Amino acid sequence: MSHPAPFTLDMAGWLSTARQLPSPNCDMRPEGRAIELIVVHNISLPPGVFDGDAVIELFTNQLDWDANPYYQSIRDIKVSAHFFIRRDGSLIQFVPCSLRAWHAGVSSWHGCERCNDFSIGIELEGTDDLPFTEAQYTSLIPLLQSLKQAYPIRAVVGHSEIAPGRKTDPGVCFEWERVRGMEA
């Protein structure tokens, strides 16, 4: 199965084809720590509602906490991801890969704590129990290829794998065989 050509990343880790909306919710990675993990998440705000700008507003600290009752439960959190893939496949980048985005929270992979230190976070607009769109996979697969070419990536995992019991995303509808089959 052929996939679209990979995207191009600049030296700071900005993707040339992504819409860039810089988030303040990031900081420097620990010196000498290689980027070796990609974490796949899902997000929608409020949960199950797609196509609004609430996720963008959350990641850029512009969310109106009073716009929806659900927002009170996440009030004042400071989070981000490197990438956000909308239902229509459009790609937004909030943090350059050279910086640490705040996406994983309390996490561990192969005995290493603080996965934000050495990972890239990709958020898919969705929920745990709804299938992702073909357009999302059409953006995700070349993005993963590009990241694997640019960095010494050892694995692509779900948020649930690095924060078991705390997180369940990307959920049962994520088609891991498509992602893991891209190496063939």
Image: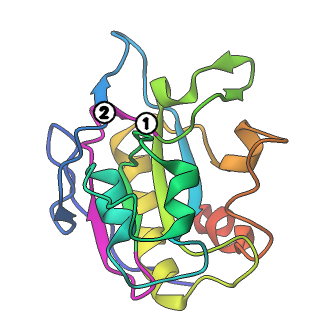
Q: In the rendering, at what x and y percent does residue 25 appear?
A: 31, 37
Q: How crowded is mark 1: few (under 14 residues within 10 Å), some or many (20 or more)?
A: many
Give the colour scheme shown: rainbow
Query: Sequence order check: which comes first, mark 1 or mark 2?
Result: 2
Q: Is residue 116 above or below residue 51?
A: above
The local secondary structure at tag 2 comes to strand
Which one is nearer the viewer's eye here, 39 or 129?
A: 129
Q: How crowded is mark 2: few (under 14 residues within 10 Å), some or many (20 or more)?
A: many
State whether the magenta stretch is mostly helix, strand or loop.
loop
The local secondary structure at tag 1 comes to loop
Is residue 104 visible in the rendered structure shown here? yes
Mark 1 and mark 2: Cα distance apart in space: 6 Å
Q: Could you say which disc has been placed on residue 26 in the image?
A: 2
Q: In the rendering, at what x and y percent does residue 117 appear?
A: 46, 23
Q: Is residue 37 magenta?
A: no
Which one is nearer the viewer's eye here, 148 or 137?
A: 137
Q: Which residue is drawn at the image coordinates 28% and 49% (left, top)?
A: 61
Q: Give the range drawn in magenta.
A: 86-102
Q: Which residue is drawn at the image coordinates 36% and 10% (left, top)?
A: 32
Question: Horizontal placement of 28 versus 46: left or right?
Answer: left
Q: Name the residue under label 1.
A: 102
Q: What residue type is labelled 1?
A: Trp
Marks 1 and 2 close (CB-CB < 8 Å) = yes
Q: What residue type is labelled 2?
A: Cys
Say how many tags the image has: 2
Question: Horizontal placement of 168 versus 146: left or right?
Answer: right
**Outermost residue toward the right?**
165
Q: Which residue is drawn at the image coordinates 52% and 79% (left, top)?
A: 137
Residue 176 picture quarter:
bottom right
Residue 129 picture quarter:
bottom right
Residue 154 picture quarter:
top right
Q: Is residue 65 above or below residue 27?
A: below
